[in-house]
Image (cartoon, grey):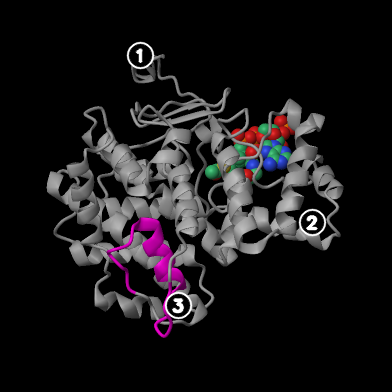
Amino acid sequence: AIDIRKLRSETGLVTYDPGYGNTGSVKSEITFIDGENGILRYRGYPIEQLCERSDFIETSYLLIYGDLPTREQLDSFRESITYHTLLREDMKPFFDAFPRDAHPMAILSAGTSAMSTFYQNQQDPTEPWDVEVSTYRLMAKLPTVAAFAYKRSIGQPYIYPRNDLKFAANFLHMMFAVPAEPYEVDPDLARALTELLILHAEHEQNCSTSTVRLVGSSQANMFASVSAGINALWGPLHGGANQRVVEMLKGIRDADGDTSDFIQRAKDPDDPFRLMGFGHRVYKNYDPRARIIKDTADRVIRKLAGSDPLFEIAQELEETALNDDYFVERRLYPNVDFYSGLIYRAMGLPIDMYPVLFALGRLPGWIAQWREMNADPDNRIGRPRQIYTGHPEREYRGIEERT
Ligand code: ACO
């Protein structure tokens, strides 16, 4: 790799790289992606193995601390997280203040910032204990904020966390239990959600993670950095894509299931429409996460609904696109978002909660990257350069002199 810092100071050179497609801004030990061959590993472990054998808290530990935990380390990490799952009671009116139809991603990012106001003396990025306790609090409380945002939107009472349940099961409980009735978490659903969370947990320098790093590089605290990451994830070209995929599939269903018009539009250079859930900056092969998620979708839909016409349409769309020159030449394959929304749909989650689920999954990745950056002696404030294309110097003229 070229040492661009040295080159710049010696030559004044600035590289022009829109979207940072070719700029390595960090050295990282966390995630390995081979986009050509569709390989994804967390700390060296293939995603397929973690998905099959690990759970979300163990995978989070691996991402954050670098190795799989011993039994003792895992128990202690789990305990530290469950200890913090409750929100301060004073935060409840915060949720009531939002309009009922507020997008839960807005509430999630605002809630993450708001939470930090309760722990202002424990957020110093240079204090190891502050970094530890911020990690536990974010991991513990983000699902509670997400579930409260959902309950607010449907007008039901908030359901408090259950610390005897594991991460995914507790989240399902807070989402779907109602005070008057018993609620048993379906272990198959909890497993499917665990798989989804693991598959979303980390993906190196994507838009939201780079945002977390950029904000954190100014020594902003972990809550502020993660809150910014949530906003970056919200966009339809990133974590909002799962929502857009389902909307697109509904559009196709309403057009009598005819996929050809949508394929045609996606190929038309004059039409901004894109096949949502297709294509990736790094994967030029089938996204390994999408492969697993497709199987999970099949399992969950079969169990909960028997079938879903949108799943049929998605598979047909995939089949058509994978045999179409336009998509083949550009190496556009289904990405992680293509089938995930269909699982959330089968679970009964409303569409605007889909990116929230993505955020919950991505949280340990954001934390791991923030901590890695913070511990890196090479870390400097993020400050990209630009190529100025505006006016040369101009003389100010009073308003009456302007034409
Ligand atoms: N449908 C149709 N054409 C596409 C699509 C698509 N989904 N994705 C890319 N293309 C085309 C582009 O029009 C472009 O064609 P051209 O060379 O003729 O101009 C070519 O493929 C390359 O596309 P870029 O936009 O340059 O690729 P980039 O790496 O910048 O974008 C992205 C990647 C944003 C994911 C893009 O593929 C896209 O918009 N996909 C749909 C949205 C989506 O699914 N986002 C989720 C991404 S995964 C994640 O965030 C977890």
- Are the two marked residues, 1 and 2, in contact with CB atoms closer than 8 angstroms? no
- Are the two marked residues, 3 and 2, in contact with CB atoms closer than 8 angstroms? no
The quadrant of the picture occupied by the N terminus is: top left
Q: How many numbered discs?
A: 3
Say whether residue 348 is magenta: no
Determine which residue is flagged by label 1. Answer: 10
Q: CA distance from mark 3 to mark 2?
A: 31 Å
Determine which residue is flagged by label 2. Answer: 252
Of marks 1 and 2, which one's residue comes earlier in the chain?
1
Residue depicted at x 76% and y 44%: 317
The quadrant of the picture occupied by the C terminus is: bottom right
Local secondary structure at mark 1 = helix
Of marks 3 and 2, which one's residue comes earlier in the chain?
3
Asked which quadrant contains residue 5, the reply is: top left
Left or right, 279 with respect to 161, comes to right
- Image coordinates of residue 146 in percent, x first then y, are 41, 65
Q: Can see residue 275?
A: yes
Q: Which of these two is toward me, 56 or 365? A: 56
Left or right, 144 with respect to 78, comes to right
- Image coordinates of residue 124 in percent, x first then y, are 17, 50
Q: Please report the bounds of the magenta region as a residue range.
A: 160-183
Determine which residue is flagged by label 3. Answer: 152
Q: Classify the position of ligand 1 by quadrant: top left, top right, bottom left or bottom right.
A: top right
